Amino acid sequence: MNEDYQYPLMGGLSDDEVVDLMTFYQRVEDAYERPAGVNRAAFIEAYRAFTRVIPSQMEQKQLERAFEDRSGYDPYAVIKLARGKTDKMLKIDEA
């Protein structure tokens, strides 16, 4: 994990859209870093906002890969966990 990284963004976003992307990235970080993980409902809400801001799946994947490259945290792993579990909290345990 790289502690000193910047969130990947796209040009032409409004301030509110930048906040939505940053919130999504923070929820991914929470799933990895917080002892209890991230609240599933809060993560899903942040992910839905992310997909509204970036409707193109190709651009979503590009941003997710850029975030993983910079942070070491895989957004897709958290998305997959959120889709497959009904637990209240989502936690990624790194091996």
Image (cartoon, rainbow, N blue to C red):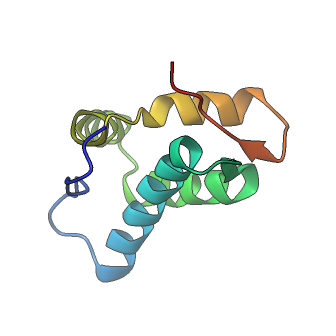
Q: Residue at x 37, y 53 (%)?
A: 54
Q: Relative to residue 46, is residue 18 depicted above or below?
A: below
Q: Residue 90 in the image: x percent, y percent?
A: 70, 41
Q: Residue 33 in the image: x percent, y percent?
A: 52, 47
Q: Residue 20 in the image: x percent, y percent?
A: 44, 67
**Lateral position of residue 45 relative to residue 12, left or right:** right
Q: Nearer the viewer, residue 28 or 65?
A: 28
Q: Relative to residue 30, is residue 11 depicted above or below?
A: below
Residue farthest left in this picture: 11
Residue farthest bottom in this picture: 15
Q: Residue at x 65, y 48 (%)?
A: 35
Q: Residue 53 in the image: x percent, y percent?
A: 40, 60
Q: Relative to residue 26, is residue 91 depicted above or below?
A: above
**Lateral position of residue 56 relative to residue 35, left or right:** left
Q: Nearer the viewer, residue 16 or 41?
A: 41
Q: Nearer the viewer, residue 62 or 66?
A: 66
**Image quadrant of residue 66?**
top left
Number of dots carrying numbers? 0
Q: Residue at x 23, y 33 (%)?
A: 69
**Lateral position of residue 24 relative to residue 68, left or right:** right
Identify the image quadrant of the N terminus: top left
Q: Residue at x 63, y 53 (%)?
A: 43
